[in-house]
Amino acid sequence: MIGLKIFLIIVFLIFAEFVISNTFLSVTKVTVKDAKIPASFNGYKIVQLSDLHDKSFGKDNSRLIRVIDNQKPDIIVLTGDIINSTDTNFQNLYSFSKQLVKICPVYYIVGNHEQMLPSGLYKDMIGNLKKIGIIVLDNEKATLVKNGKKINLYGLWFNLRYYRNLSNQTADVSDYYLTKVTIEQLIGKANTSSYNILLAHNPVYFDAFSAWGADLTLSGHIHGGMIRIPFKGGLLSPEIKFFPKYDAGIFKDNGSEMFVSRGLGNGTFGIRLFNTPEIAVIFLESDK
């Protein structure tokens, strides 16, 4: 009887954690300091949203909008997979976008799910987002200005061949690895005299982002490993890799930093555990 009670308690706790991990919103605040950040950008707030996968938090995403608005961001960045590749109706996305642009400027890059849409549907979706006022960075650069000083914001997306299944060992990995040269072909050389923020959905290529000249990369895609193991990290990446290196949080490489969002939605696998949906707030500070 005691064993049964213990078993039922464990089942209840797991169920409760499952509900929390799939419905509760958490806010992660990160401060990034760099000598290249102009002093006028001290306290500049970037809200990052990633991997929503057409999920709603409250009617018309009212809970999500409320939390975002409370952060008083200077800009909002959407780092891909905001919809599912199987979606054909984007009214939830359009409604959500109309509310976001009322808060502040919104920048959007596509992830692998957007790229897997039929071409006509994809073009219509991107066109409608632009009409709403979303700034879509299609391998392009935007300039953020505050009190006359500037930093660069680049939006990168790359061919689906670079989203490889790492459990498939038949392919030559070198043929499917994004490099600095490839990035330069897509968005040009980085302006290293200024502070460069790179939006890139897949964090696997952090070494290439760093070598290219990104001072700060904002990524998602990994969903925090979907199931987070205490003291170990995320369990599984979408590329079928156990305990991925860049699962969530801040990472550093040769003076470059990358923040990987745990995302908001559930994705293809449809499960989150010990892994609440995340709204990230990145604060910029000059380190002069």
Image: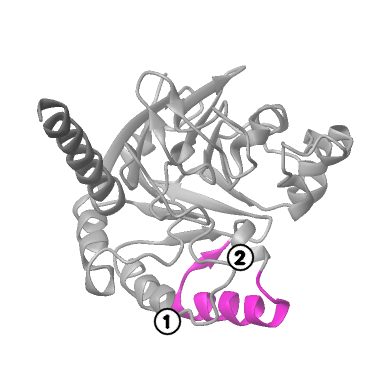
Closer-to-camera residue (177/213): 177
In the image, residue 19 above or below residue 234: below
- Residue at x 38% of width, y 64% of height: 55
User: What's the magenta region?
Assistant: 117-136
In the image, residue 169 above or below residue 46: above
Residue 177 location in percent, x, y?
79, 37
* Mark 2 surroundings: few (<14), some (14-19) or many (≥20) residues within 10 A: many
Please state which amino acid type lies under the numbered disc 1.
Answer: Gln
Query: What label sits on residue 91 in the rendered view?
Result: 1
Query: What label sits on residue 81 in the rendered view?
Result: none
Q: Work out which quarter of the rendered image holds the C terminus and state it.
A: top left
Q: Is residue 137 left or right of residue 272?
A: right
CB within 8 Å, label 1 to label 2: no
Which is nearer the N-term, disc 1 or disc 2?
Answer: 1
* Mark 1 surroundings: few (<14), some (14-19) or many (≥20) residues within 10 A: few
Q: Please give the residue where the numbered disc 2 appears in the rendered image.
A: 114
Closer-to-camera residue (73/156): 156
Q: Is residue 191 left or right of residue 285?
A: right
Q: Is residue 144 magenta?
A: no
Residue 29 location in percent, x, y?
30, 35
Q: Work out which quarter of the rendered image holds the N terminus and state it.
A: top left
Cα–Cα span, label 1 and label 2: 15 Å
Q: Is residue 123 magenta?
A: yes
Please state which amino acid type lies under the numbered disc 2.
Answer: Glu
